């Protein structure tokens, strides 16, 4: 049996301008026991939070993709700006 082991890479909270009185949080973690089955998937997990609730979680991400999703989330829920996708 493999025990899940995670290393927190980035974690922070900022006050939201869109959701008054709430904090918007982002946590990027790396699965230390990750074994690649495909080049498309990576060992990173992303947790997106508004207030004390987890808004959405992603798993199997590469580090650049996790950072991109975190930035889009922060721009949308912190500042109300939704960047276009290319």
Image (tube, rainbow, N blue to C red):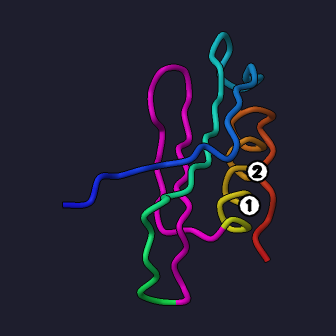
Spot occupied by residue 84 in the image (x, y as percentages of width and height): 79, 65
Determine which of the numbered discs, if any, sits on residue 47 in the image. Answer: none
How many numbered marks have been drawn onto this rendered protein structure?
A: 2
Instruction: Using the image as rendered, state which of residue 10 and residue 23 is in the foreground.
Output: 10
Residue at image location 54% in from the left, 33% down from the top:
49
Residue at horizontal 61 percent and vertical 41 percent from the top? 27
> What residue appears at the point 65 percent right and 28 percent down from the top-left corner?
24
Residue ID for mark 1: 68
Residue 11 quadrant? top right
Query: Looking at this view, is 83 or 26 the one in front?
Result: 26
In the image: residue 56, left or right of residue 46 = left
Callout 2: 10 Å neighbours few (<14), some, many (20+)? few
Residue on which the image places disc 2: 71
Question: Which quarter of the picture shows residue 2?
Answer: bottom left
Instruction: Judge whether residue 56 is colored magenta.
Output: yes
**Magenta segment includes 8:** no
Q: Is residue 36 left or right of residue 77?
A: left
| Above or below 86: residue 71 | above
Q: Is residue 55 above or below residue 13?
A: below
In magenta, the rendered stretch is 39-62
x, y percent for residue 57: 46, 50
- Main SS of the magenta segment? strand
Q: Position of residue 39 (x, y in %)?
A: 55, 89
């Amino acid at each position: 049996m493999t025990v899940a082991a995670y290393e927190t890479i980035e974690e922070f909270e900022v006050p939201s301008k869109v959701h008054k009185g709430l904090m918007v949080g982002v946590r990027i973690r790396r699965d230390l026991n990750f074994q690649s089955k495909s080049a498309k998937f990576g060992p990173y997990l992303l947790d997106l939070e508004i207030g004390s609730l987890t808004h959405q979680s992603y798993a199997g991400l590469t580090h650049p993709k996790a950072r991109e999703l975190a930035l889009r989330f922060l721009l949308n829920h912190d500042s109300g700006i939704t960047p276009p996708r290319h």
